[in-house]
Amino acid sequence: MSRRIDWPDLLLGLFLLLVATGTLVATRKLGVGTAANMGPGYMPRVIAIAVILFGLFFTGRGLLRSHLGIAQVHLRPLLAIPLAVALFSLLVEVAGLAVASLITILAAAYATHEVRAREAVIFGVVIAAASVLLFVKVLSLPLPIWPPDLFG
Amino acid sequence: MKTRMIRALALSAFAAAAFVAVPFSAAKAQDFKGPVRIVVPFAPGGTSDILARLIGPKLSDAIKTSVIVENKPGAAGNLGAEAVAKAKPDGHTLLLMDVGNLSTAPSLFPDLNFNIQKDLAPIGMVMFGPYVLAVHPSVGVSTPKDLVAYAKANPGKLTVANSGVGAVNHITAITIAKALGIQWKNVPYKGGSAASRAVISGESNTIINGTTATLPFVVNKQLVGIAVSGDQRLPTAKDLPTFKEAGFPAGDAGTWQGLLTTGGTPAPLVNKLNAELKKILAMPDVQAKIAEQGGVVKAGSPADFAKWLDNSVKTWGGVIKENGLKAQ
Amino acid sequence: MELLDNLMLGLSTAFQFKNLLFCLIGALIGTAIGVLPGIGPIPTVALLLPFTFGLEPASAMIMLAGIFYGAQYGGSTTAILVNVPGETSSVVTCIDGHEMARQGRAGTALAIAALSSFFAGTVATVVIAVLSLPLSALALKFTAVEYFSLLVLGLIAAVVMAHGSVMKSLAMVLLGLLIGLIGIDVNSGVARMTFGITELSDGIDFVPVAMGLFGLGEIIANLERKDERRVVTSQRFRDLMPSWADLKQAFPAMLRGTAIGSVLGVLPGGGAALPPFTAYALEKKVARDPSRFGKGAIEGVAGPEAANNAGAQTSFIPLLTLGVPSNALMALMIGALMMQGIQPGPQVMTEQPALVWGLIASMWAGNLMLLVINLPLVGVWVSMLKIPYRLLFPAIVLFCCIGTYGISNSLFNVWLMLGCAVIGYFFIKIGVEPAPLLLGLVLGPQLEENFRRALLLSDGDFTVFIRHPISAVLLGVVAILLLAMLSPAVLRKRKEALTE
């Protein structure tokens, strides 16, 4: 049966259905109003229903059209890049920009198997120093450079 | 060669930026250690921001530590206010904002994450900017009496642009309509300048807004001034009656800017900041700059400010609740 | 010959040594921050605002304006080289600009972007000098009704623009509109789909979504590929500069882009998003072979870049003639004027002629400086691509994080970017273009706001959209576009049916 599934279309359709249903649930309590005096729920509902129609269309077409696969998903970059961003968010206000930058660079660098440990560390230190200089010193971004609890 | 020169130029521009970006620093004293932040919960360039940048360097000289102005815009000022409410109560995090917005926040946003009266400590009021009520020339009235007569004869024909649902000028419009028994349509816009633009283009035909956003157009005859809020007439537009003279309610409606800090800050620190603020507000150059912002200096004690806040929460908040302007 | 007198006054102000210097500083800072993803002209101008206190008003305005249009030049650099759009306006440049870079034509793309911006900047300066008054009168004719119709036209343009299937891009526009609805509803003050998160009450910020969907999503996908992922660099000078054939191909696009940008820039809020998107759609419509778009078409860089820079400059018109800001940056400029003790308003032009005309004249000088700065920089930027990708991409990830944080100093946007990165990767995997989604996201809130305001003011009478002449014309164009878009599809279907 999988012969007949167009995966990109099917996944897009399901994604649209998910988002639109989520919208309908989230806005179910908002008033719809009338055309002259629309409530806050009017537009979300109209658009969500349109998105559902598109979702159904793509899901249906995905199930019926001839097979189209999706290129293999590699987990390493898919996990490492979001992890790098998450580490940045978690660390930057607690540990300061210098530490957060270095760790973000390292985590991101490990997204590829081409990574060379020593090179990544040196590069990370240089970029972290440059970021501190550029963003905190020059552009006055209100971020601590070092862990504020240690140096505050 | 050429690229190297360009690079050097780019570097020197950055160096210049670095030079100007150094915070206004000064030697340290006992009361204040490390930088004091003035959080402005709005985008830069607005009245609160200009006031903060005006007061910041002078405060830095007075308390002998660096003072940094930090813009933290979002959610009608609530994001920045929340950051100050949840900061360490050591007087090093200050909040300068349109406190009208602050006083309506609890009524407008029931899921506000902090208590504006407990988690914030008033230091002192800074300025009051009166409102001007003006109409588009197409309405064809020029006095408060004619305006009321027009509104009664044409219910719903006056469309009042405000800077957002629950904004103080929206509340003022509702209060006036109720007291005078007239009907006008309140049209919300995204901010005061969008509202001004709409009235100049004639999309809406009435506006209640600060002087800097209205008077230039009155002078240019693109708008017709009707009345001003506040205790006295404006020196720059003496022919406009005050709300009180015109028989309108809400005479104290307008932009109120105040300085606050985190709730629970020790009273001596708050009083010290209040004393310095009062000194700064007495400086002639500060008064001149505030006059340019279309306002007058309102210096006072923390207790005066707290009383004002309490009163506004009740009256303005009451209007919001009565009219169901609550955000859900 | 009042115009000539004014221009002479402007030139004599702008060409004072110190003003030229401030213009240069502004242009340099603008270029630098434009190149950095996320750090836009607004925070930079805000940062420098207090330091303009000590300057003369004309010098201050000249420098701040230089930062603004300098950032328009710089923004395209990151878009072309690493597919990270730092500003709304450079999303479109990503599409064909980055594609050109992948084909080893990064130098050409960068040079064309700079040349188009310069050309548009020059023309827009003349437009401001000569046509300010009629254009600001036109801007005042745009009420909620006209603006709604214009936005519909912009969204239809987005559909035309997509190089994939029309159905998919329609779905993406709708998805963008839906996401755009998040936040406090202007017309009722009610918070929608904010799930109690305070940061969401002002809606989803554009930059983290764009950086996630485009920049980071592409990095994840890139890392899966083996060889073809690296941007080919060519270091011969000849390849850095566009050829005559390139210029000939790009020039009409520059002209059309400049015209579109000059008009749309005057409208409130439209300055950043509408001009480049509309210009791209137009280029694709008039091209003999639209299938080249999305695969490195030079017109796809020239048109939007010209529109973008022209729009950035004409967005000064409402500020200068009416004293009303057309976007957040112009609101800052008003703040700058007020700090200088100048009351912004309709009188500024007559009361401060040296300031206004000096600013206008400085725009041309600034654009010339930017061209001189940017053309030699092309070589520098392209050589940056020689950094191994394994080192380049972690740095991009970090700069995206810091830049997103810098928009409103909030970590929330960084988390939002993370989510969008995963969705962006998902979109690449299933072959969906994210650009229409971004346009929907930017225009959605304005679309709803104006639609509902128009109906509120007309007591729910839908015919206002046809009764207002400008609106009727705009909606007419929408109808024609829709017909034109559908007809080839209809014809093709018929042909298929016949052959079967």
Image (cartoon, helix red, strand yellow):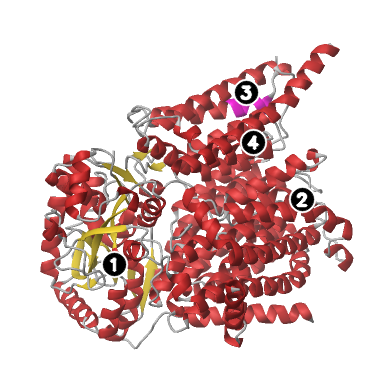
Residue C327, image x and y in percent? 48, 57
Is A9 positioned to the left or the right of B103 in the image?
right
Question: Does dot 1 land on a helix, a strand or a loop?
Answer: strand
Mark positioned earlier in the residue sequence (2 or 4): 4
Q: Dot 3: few (<14), some (14–19), or many (≥20) neighbours within 10 Å?
A: many
Q: Is residue B247 left or right of residue B143?
A: left
Callout 4: chain? C
Question: In the rendered view, does C409 fall on the left or right side of A127?
Answer: left
Q: Amino acid under label 3?
A: Phe
- Residue B224's place in the image compared with C474, above or below, is below
Q: Position of residue C273 (x, y in %)?
A: 57, 50
Give the residue type that dot 1 points to: Leu
User: Disc 4 and disc 3: Cα gap in Å?
Assistant: 17 Å
Amino acid carrying mark 4 in the image: Val
Circle 2 Cα neighbour tier, 10 Å, few/some/many (<14 / 14–19 / ≥20): many
Residue C183 in sight: yes
Residue shown at 67%/54% (left/top)? C259
Residue at x 78% of width, y 48% of height = C296
- For residue C159, which numbered disc appears in the image? 4
Disc marking residue A58: 3
Give the foreground label among 2 and 3: 2
Q: Are marks 2 and 1 on the same chain?
A: no
Residue position marked by numbered label 2 in the rendering:
C299
Disc 1 target residue: B96
Of marks 4 and 1, the one in the foreground: 4
Amino acid type of the residue tagged 2 in the rendering? Glu
Q: Which residues are magenta?
A: A7-13
Chain letter belonging to callout 2: C
Query: Which image quarter is the N terminus of chain C in?
Result: bottom right
Residue C387 x %, y %: 75, 64
